[in-house]
Amino acid sequence: GAVVSQHPSRVICKSGTSVKIECRSLDFQATTMFWYRQFPKQSLMLMATSNEGSKATYEQGVEKDKFLINHASLTLSTLTVTSAHPEDSSFYICSARAGRNTGELFFGEGSRLTVL
Amino acid sequence: DQQVKQNSPSLSVQEGRISILNCDYTNSMFDYFLWYKKYPAEGPTFLISISSIKDKNEDGRFTVFLNKSAKHLSLHIVPSQPGDSAVYFCAASGQAGTALIFGKGTTLSVSS
């Protein structure tokens, strides 16, 4: 089946620094990728939709200047958390859809960000 | 306003019995529904899906039922196994290419 790889799986950083998370579709091209965030014991909340070759579409309440999304190619999207603060500590998950007409999304393994 | 609701945060079942996880939705534009399984510190894993034109889809031990008039779907796992213990998320999608909307999840515990 389609595979989505996410890196790094865990990252610890100091407050004020920036962290980049990569999301790759390994055996298919994804014109659209999605970034989700999950707080402990809560649902996956959609942060933004990443479109190849164009600007990302952010959900209401998500700061686009803080969570920079770049979709430079059909197999790679990156999420950069800029000037990270402890409240940004969370589990970030990317996903991609393998085909146009299927609703199924394939998810990456997730990235646990801890900001000290 | 939560468009996808999983009202039971947890469910405990004995091994070999049936597990029934429920999900309700409010948006009549949803036309594709999926169930994902998630272990801690891992990304969700796709389990089974159903299109709005169907009312049942079966895959091995997993069956999803959809009641469009009630805007309700359920996931049946039979027989339940201890390895099924995880958080189960119900998700819905509108038009193809759009993101999934997730429920809050139900933690299933299967005891041996």
Image (cartoon, coloured by chain):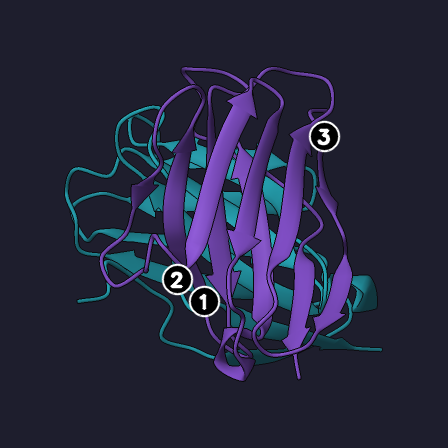
Chain colours: A purple, B cyan
Look at the numbered disc 3 and give the secondary structure of its residue: loop
Q: Residue at x 69, y 38 (%)?
A: B60
Percent position of residue A113, x then y: 65, 68
Residue type, mark 2 in image: Gly
Quadrant (top left, top right, bottom left, bottom right) of the C terminus of chain B: bottom right
Q: Residue at x 72, y 24 (%)?
A: A1
The residue to which callout 3 is attached is: A3
| Viewer-side label of 2, 1 | 1
Q: Is residue B101 left or right of residue B61?
A: left
The residue to which callout 1 is attached is: A43
Q: Measure the alpha-carbon separation of dots 2 and 1.
A: 6 Å
The residue to which callout 2 is attached is: B103
Tell me the quarter of the picture where residue A56 sits.
top left
Quadrant (top left, top right, bottom left, bottom right) of the N terminus of chain B: bottom left
Q: Measure the alpha-carbon separation of dots 3 and 2.
A: 23 Å
Q: Residue at x 29, y 60 (%)?
A: B24
Percent position of residue A106, x then y: 60, 36
Q: Is residue B102 visible?
A: yes
Q: Do the residues at discs 3 and 2 belong to one chain?
A: no
Letter of the chain that mark 2 sits on in the rendering: B
Percent position of residue B104, x then y: 42, 69
Residue type, mark 3 in image: Val
Percent position of residue B110, x then y: 73, 74
Tell me the quarter of the picture where residue A102 sits.
top left
Give the crowd class for mark 3: few <14, some 14-19, many >=20 residues within 10 Å: some
Letter of the chain that mark 1 sits on in the rendering: A
Q: Measure the alpha-carbon separation of dots 3 and 1.
A: 22 Å
